[in-house]
Image (tube, grey):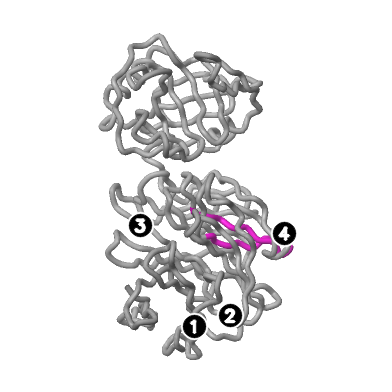
Amino acid sequence: MGIWLSRRDGSKWTPPVEVAGGVDAEGGRESCWNPVLFDPSGGPLLLFYKVGPSPSRWRGMMMRSLDDGRTWTEPVPLPDGILGPAKNHPFERADGTILCGSSSEHDGWRVHFETTKDKGATWAATPPVNDGKSVGLIQPALLRTIGGGFIALMRSNAGRIYECRSHDGGDTWSPPGPTVFPNPNAGIDAVTLRDGRHVLIYNPVTEGRGILAVALSEDGKTWDRVLTLEEEKGAEFSYPAVVQARDGLVHVTYTWKRRTIRHVVLDPARLKIGPADPPDPRSSRKIYFIQTNLGTMTLELFETEAPRTVAQFKRLVQEGFYDGKDFYRVVRGHVIQAGGGDAPSLPPEFNTRPHVFGTLGLGRVGDEWSGDSEIYICVAPRPHLDGRYTVFGRLTEGLDVLEKIANVPVEERWEGPGNKMAMHKPIEPVIILRAGYGLLK
């Protein structure tokens, strides 16, 4: 596996040529990973990439080109503890310092940041912004904010894009937290345009990579999805990269169905917040939802994987069973729960669906045959529940509502057999106003 390069020559791309291969100390070949091209002011053109048998054991490498990528120097290993940018392009500060968003995978997925003031001769690195245990984060994408600050948007294994911020040019960073964007554990990229707006390329789902979309923000705080680049069920559109060229146009590349690389050019003047996409066909499709006093969450139900559980949930919704009930248990970093009792017990329908942010499952109080009407929704990845509880759906919209519920103040109560279950009951009740089925408004 090597690093290949193609040049845009007029209206065509040149045949790709290999510019880097993973040659080890004994002359053998190792895999190459995550190439990043960067063109700092005054040159030279820099190529960063990784070499190694796996992401947990790879090493950072760098090459230079003085003729716009036609020829390259020999690869230079980066210093110990330095990996270079992880998938996404660096940012050059006004003083010439190059800031790289980086990540390591040898001790959990952890994000850190690296800087070089002399175009790769010497380096410095920040401590990781996360511990890699509660949530895994990799491949940060950098956005510039007014006043010299930065936002880093990060791929996660928690079902959401995470972000952290720096107010001192990237020297120190805030603790990371989830955004409203879903993330199916897939790569993202982002760029700050010359007019100050921010563009994000991402997969707007929690599972699969069948949709690739563009989101736009004017302040880095609120975002709107403004364009769908690709959408096909079961297909994969992934690992996007985005830059703004000298002529002002925005160039996006991404893996197309694991078969080729697609190149899309966007005019930023036509990227506007508003109905840029055609009408969403879901607007005329009935869908299941849970409406609470904190907002509405819409659901996709997995009838193939859990037919009996889904059938009983639909019946209970039709009967108004959940209406007026509260989410009586809210455990931050775990689940929220509602319902319970007054319905036949169901056999387990364990399946391969993972417990990630937004997963809808069937709760139980005893053995695996004791599930009835109690439901839970994961507010974080809970892999220890996989294969032990019935997953029968997931949230499709309202992830921000779920985040809001997960962070309400609670009081700890010990209930259940032997008073051994911590209930974490909300101080102000979170009420299900209606669990229903109808048109998505």
Q: Secondary structure at mark 4?
A: loop
Residue furthest to the top:
342
Query: Cα distance, mark 1 to mark 3?
Result: 32 Å
Q: Earlier in the sequence, mark 4 or mark 2?
A: 2
**On screen, residue 4 above or below 275:** below
Depth order, front residue of 268/108? 108
Label 3 Cα neighbours within 10 Å, binned few <14 / some 14-19 / many ≥20: many
Which residue is labeled 3 in the image?
237
- The type of residue carrying mark 1 is Val
**On screen, residue 411 above or below 25:** above
Please name which of the two marks, 4 or 3, marks the residue nearer to the observer: 4
Number of the label disc, if any, that sits on residue 76: 1
Asked whether, in this view, residue 26 is left or right of residue 199, the answer is left
Query: Cα distance, mark 1 to mark 4?
Result: 32 Å
Please name which of the two marks, 2 or 3, marks the residue nearer to the observer: 2
- Check the picture and name the quadrant holding the N terminus: bottom left
Q: Earlier in the sequence, mark 1 or mark 4?
A: 1
Number of the label disc, if any, that sits on residue 64: none
Number of the label disc, if any, that sits on residue 120: 2
State yes or no: discs 1 and 2 in contact (Cβ < 8 Å). Answer: yes
Q: Earlier in the sequence, mark 1 or mark 2?
A: 1
